[in-house]
Image (cartoon, rainbow, N blue to C red):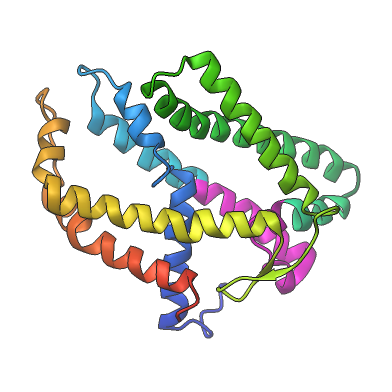
Amino acid sequence: IPDFSGTNVRGILMTIMDAMGQLFYSISVAMGIMVTYGSYFKDKDNLIKSVNQIEIFDTIVAFLAGVMIIPAVYVFLGAEGLENAGPGLVFVAMPKIFAQMGVAGNILGAVFFIMVLFAALTSCISIMEAICSGMIDKGMSRKKATITEGVIALVLSTVVCLGYNVFYFEFKLPNGSVGQILDIMDYLSNNVLMPILAIGTCILVGWILKPKTIIDEATKNGEKFGRKWLYTAMIKVVAPIMLVILLLGSLGVY
């Protein structure tokens, strides 16, 4: 039975903020990916149906991941293991867990990291397509854009890999954690740049373009948009406020 005795309002709010931070990655918010893929969307396709499917499957996958990973970390590594997050959880905590499981751990570990590989690969494809699409719009051929972007990504990723040995150093981040090159880049992108871009998107859609523009586009083929009031309230008020709170928390303000 879960022990809620140590639960307080601040802890609940921090959990909500952490979940919002996870959403930036899981549904590719503020990366330009949805804009790029949206430009490939056909007029006859049902946008609302696609959004609903993404909501459902993203929630299911996140729930299953939490149910499988968090209990395993607690059982094998104790409460201290739960302090790991991000790269530390995947590349430090999980290998320790698999090592304690013997032969079964070797098999599960191999399967786990193969899945991580495919997750990283599919994420890279979508992220690089967003950048590549912009380069193509500027007049560059897809082949040249892909090669150029690939070379830049290779150089930067090599520097990140060497950040754990040749270029190793520790830097205290504004949120109180200590990180290396990967952690610094992850912090800047996920905790600073993405919230700022998301806030800008909310302002653009909610107050400049107006929600009605988006609703009309989503329902132009006769589809029903049953949550107009909720969407309008979220994009104009709730989401910007929550994102500002998330950004301030990431910057160590509270």
Residue at 50% x, 35% y: name it.
127
Specify whether 75 is left or right of 147. Answer: right
Return the residue found at the far right: 102
Whether 72 is among the magenta residues is yes
Residue 117 position, x and y percent, is 68, 34
Query: Residue 136 versus residue 237: which sits nearer the camera?
Result: 136
Q: Is residue 83 visible?
A: no
Q: Is residue 40 magenta?
A: no
Which residue appears at 71% of the width and 73% of the height? 79
Q: How many marks?
A: 0
Residue 246, quarter of picture: bottom left
Q: Residue furthest front?
A: 139
Residue 8: x percent and y percent? 45, 83
Which residue occupies 71% across, 61% down? Answer: 180
In the rendered image, residue 170, in percent from the top left (x then y), is placed at 74, 67
Left or right of residue 225, residue 7 in this image: right
In depth, the one of 68 and 14 nearer the eye is: 14
Is 166 drawn above or below residue 82 in the view shown?
above
Specify the quadrant that holds the N terminus. Answer: bottom right
Q: Which residues are magenta?
A: 62-90
Relative to 207, 114 lies left or right: right
- Above/below status of 63 relative to 225: below
Give residue 7's position: percent from left, percent from top: 49, 81
Q: Is 163 in front, or is 137?
A: 137
Q: Is residue 58 shown to the viewer in this render?
A: yes
Horizontally, residue 151 falls left or right of residue 46, namely right
**Predominant secondary structure in magenta?**
helix
Q: Quadrant of the C terminus?
A: bottom left
